[in-house]
Amino acid sequence: VFLWTALIRGYIFNGPISEAKVLYSCMRRQGVKPSSFTFCALFKACTSMGDLSLGCQLHGQMFKFSGFDSDLFLHAGNALIDLYVKSGVLKSARMVFDEMPVKDFISGTSLIVAYAKNGDMEVARELFDDLEVKDAVVWTAMITSYSQNARPKEALELFERMQCFGIKVDEFTLAGVISACAQLGTTKYALCIRDITERSGHGPERNVVIGSALVDMYAKCGRLNDAYEIFNVMRERNVYTYSSLILGLAIHGRAVDALQLFYEMEKTDIRPN
RNA sequence: GUUUGAAGUGGUAACU
């Protein structure tokens, strides 16, 4: 079973992936019992091929070989959840998750993001609260989910808790939090988050995402001079950066400046969308 | 005294 699984993985890595399926059939014909490692590899193959129905078949077969240690089943379960989430069958993904004796934040994060994208923040939050161990990724996923669902207060509330727990904040977290501050449109949070950003070492000079988010935030707060200041220190800019500042100028009655900036953008190789 | 094989990698910015 070790060799068969290794071979299947080889085909997933180097292709053609469809060979993984053939190998599994051969393996079964020879009476070799697949392990949790085998299923893990196969689910991964299904995900890259977009073959949901094969995944379902294998899911059924996996029950016949129960008796995997629960900590080994974790990996296969996560791979299966990944397949279901990416195939858009959230219900099946959730079923697998609920039936896993040992869960972790890897598939937990996938599910939280999937529910949040459906606008189901209550379920997402429930999953989040139920996770016994949380890392920076799942904290960030939950915070940006609130942010993306136009619930900035909850995003900031959670961010505060994250800091209390001493979880390390990175540029992904900051992007979501800055967006939340922009939605509130008040200077109160803006200055505080600016400070946190500076201290984090992910300043606008080097990071175009953080820079654009800050430009947007200041623009929404009506602090256009600060927005310009950020814009000017940025080494790299993109269509988000320009759009954020143009919009900020436009909604604060500075139409001429907005157009002026648009003409400047046209001189660069950044194309308007 | 030391050392041995295959597995899940999820979260980021504007407008609409």
Image: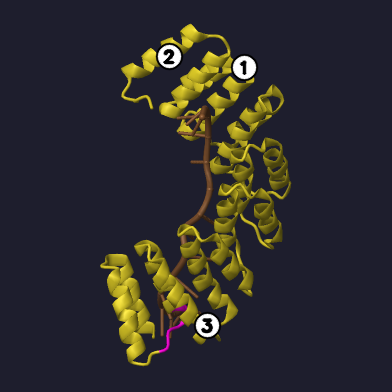
Chain colours: A yellow, B brown
Which amino acid type is marked by label 2?
Leu
For residue A39, above or below residue A213: below
Q: Main secondary structure of the magenta part?
A: loop
Q: Secondary structure at mark 2?
A: helix
Q: Secondary structure at mark 3?
A: helix
Image point (49%, 79%), residue name: A60
For label 1, the residue is: A222
**Residue A23 seen by the camera:** yes
For residue A105, above or below residue A62: above
Which amino acid type is marked by label 3?
Phe
Q: Which chain hosts label 3?
A: A
Cα distance in 3D space between marks 3 and 1: 59 Å
Residue A63: which disc? 3
Image point (30%, 68%), residue name: A17
Residue A261: which disc? 2
Q: Is residue A61 left or right of residue A166?
A: left
Q: Which chain hosts label 1?
A: A
Most foreground residue, A104 or A29: A29
Which amino acid type is marked by label 1?
Gly
Q: Which chain hosts label 2?
A: A
Q: Earlier in the sequence, mark 1 or mark 2?
A: 1
Q: Are marks 1 and 2 on the same chain?
A: yes
Determine crowd level at label 3: few under 14, some 14-19, many 20+ residues with C-alpha closer than 10 A.
few
- Tell me which segment is drawn in magenta: A33-37
